[in-house]
Amino acid sequence: MSEATPETDPRTRELKQRLDAVQRRIADAAAAAGRTDDPPRLIVVSKYHPADDVRRLASLGVTDFGENRDQEASQKAASLSGLDVRWHFVGQLQSKKAKSVVRYAHAVHSVDRPQLVESLAKAMAAEQEKSGRDSLDCFIQVSLDDDEAAHRGGAAPADVPLLADRLEGALGLRLAGVMAVAPLGADPDRAFAKLADISARLKSGHPGAVAVSAGMSQDLEAAIRFGATHLRIGSDILGSRPAVR
């Protein structure tokens, strides 16, 4: 794809308009929360959308992209290796995929069990020996559902200290903080207040674990109010999932 601009490419123009609107929402929410000097990082979740859309958004200044399937993410990262962007793995991760994910991911936002920590540490040891890459940022995904049968993935809040200790003790992995998805139908303020409390308790024992990955298209304002440092925004920027051809 030749370099596209909003003036010459309709899709780039559409993406710029959508991106501008989301960035205004983020700026307004950060100002309302007294965080003008400390805005969250925007991760554009590009799953299901073509690599050309990532290229377009990168030309508009986006530096961070999220994916939730390793096969799609690894292909995009390989085809866009010349771009100066960071890839965030934000979906549920099978331990057997760790070796592939560490080849391209700057961060994994879905660490939810000790076995995954072990698999990522083993994969990172081999990858760092091979490529010398930096440590992998790891977010502990926490379930905020009161009903365990309904939860959308993540460790129980009571399991966070164990996972944090495992991550802190693993070479090649860096404990970044916590991640969560607001439960379906739940009040996002209540959900993100709970996450903020979990984050505060984590930081008391692990002062460097300051990151909070929370907030999507429908609830980014609430996430910012309760201290989100990373937002994961997909449809409000990229639009609906493309039709399968």
Image (spheres, helix red, strand yellow):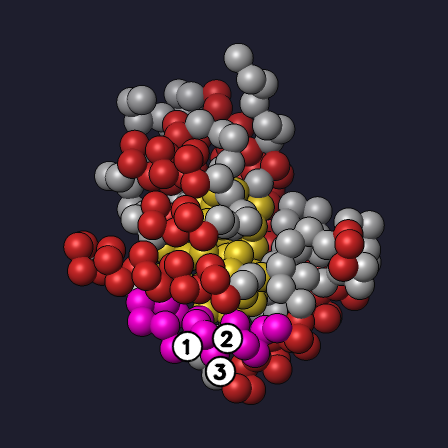
Hey, which quadrant is residue 52 in on the image? top left
Residue at 37% in and 34% down: 76
Hey, which quadrant is residue 190 in on the image? bottom right
Distance (Cα) linking label 2 and label 1: 6 Å
Q: Residues within 10 Å of mark 3 (few under 14, many from 20)?
A: some
Q: Confirm or deny contact between disc 2 and disc 1 (CB under 8 A).
A: yes
Q: Confirm or deny contact between disc 3 and disc 2 (CB under 8 A).
A: yes
Q: Is residue 202 depicted above or below 56 in this figure?
A: below
Residue at 54% in and 81% down: 203
Residue at 36% in and 26% down: 4
Q: SS for tag 1? A: helix
Residue type indicated by callout 2:
Ala
Residue 88 located within the stretch drawn in magenta: no
Span colored in magenta: 159-175
User: Of marks 3 and 2, which one's residue comes earlier in the chain?
Assistant: 2
User: Which of the labelled discs sits on residue 164, or is there none?
Assistant: 2
User: Which of the labelled discs sits on residue 168, or is there none?
Assistant: 1
Distance (Cα) linking label 3 and label 2: 8 Å
Query: Looking at the picture, how far across and down is residue 5, in whole percent?
Result: 38, 28
Query: Looking at the picture, how far across and down is residue 2, in whole percent?
Result: 29, 22
Q: Confirm or deny contact between disc 1 and disc 3 (CB under 8 A).
A: yes
Residue situated in front as seen by the camera: 126 or 32: 126
Query: Looking at the picture, how far across and down is residue 69, in whole percent?
Result: 48, 39
